[in-house]
Amino acid sequence: MSETSTTNTPPARRSWLMALPLIAFAALAALFWFRLGEGDPSKIPSALIGHPAPQTALPPLAGLVESGAQVPGLDPAMFKGKVSVVNVWASWCIPCHDEAPLLTQLGRDKRLQLIGINYKDAPDNARRFLGRYGNPYGFVGVDGNGRAAIEWGVYGVPETFIVGREGTIVYKMVGPVTPDNIDTVLKVEIDKALKAGS
């Protein structure tokens, strides 16, 4: 009789113990889902905020010419003394096509410099992209292997960073610049960076 009660009890306890990891996983998944859903994905924090911009030099996009001269690549020294908006983009990125006209508009603001990092793109496609929408960037660095994007902490293209006059990253926007966020978010952060250095 004691043998029967011993063999009957463990299967019930065993099934409860087997379900425990599944319950824990479901609880964590629900927590993650609700935390992700409650906020704006463009506000994902970056470990680089408050730190110097990566010191990665990038070559220029070959054949990209403005007023008869090659558009320069990215030189980390360019961040000192000016507020910079760094946009990571690619011709194959659908949201990059949507944000391109807004970046062209932003590129007219002479208080800042707009820098493009062309991410894992074919040079011909990148030039065609800029030819189609106009080149808003004063500098275009080519990140052919994606290493610079890793150093910048990029989750995926497009992403936009604001670098203050001291060369420190002060803001990061994950996702595209849109009509909804360009005035209410991005330009507000640019104005903060401009005031901070004046």
Image: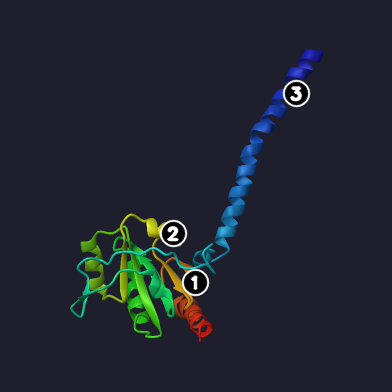
Quadrant of res 175: bottom left
First in sequence: mark 3 vs mark 2: 3
Real-space CA distance between mark 3 and mark 2, rounded to the nearest whole angstrom: 55 Å
Q: Label 3 neighbourhood size at 10 Å, few (<14), some (14-19), many (20+)? A: few
* SS assignment at label 3: helix
Q: Which residue is mark 2?
A: 151
Work out whether residue 149 can be spotted.
Answer: yes
Compared with 7, 113 (above or below) is: below
Question: In percent of the image, x 55 and y 59: which residue is there?
Answer: 36
Real-space CA distance between mark 1 and mark 3, rounded to the nearest whole angstrom: 63 Å
Question: In percent of the image, x 50 and y 78: which residue is there?
Answer: 189
Q: Which residue is mark 1?
A: 168
What's the amino acid at mark 1?
Answer: Thr
Tell me residue 172's x, y (percent). 48, 69
Disc number placed over residue 53 in the picture, else none: none
What's the amino acid at mark 3?
Answer: Thr
Residue positioned most to the front = 77
What's the amino acid at mark 2?
Answer: Glu
Tell me residue 190's x, y (percent). 47, 79
Q: Is residue 28 left or right of residue 188?
A: right
Most foreground residue, 7 or 138: 138
Observer-side mark, 1 or 3, equals: 1
Q: Label 2 neighbourhood size at 10 Å, few (<14), some (14-19), many (20+)? A: few
Q: Which residue is mark 3?
A: 9
Quadrant of res 33: bottom right
Question: In percent of the image, x 23 and y 67: which residue is there?
Answer: 127
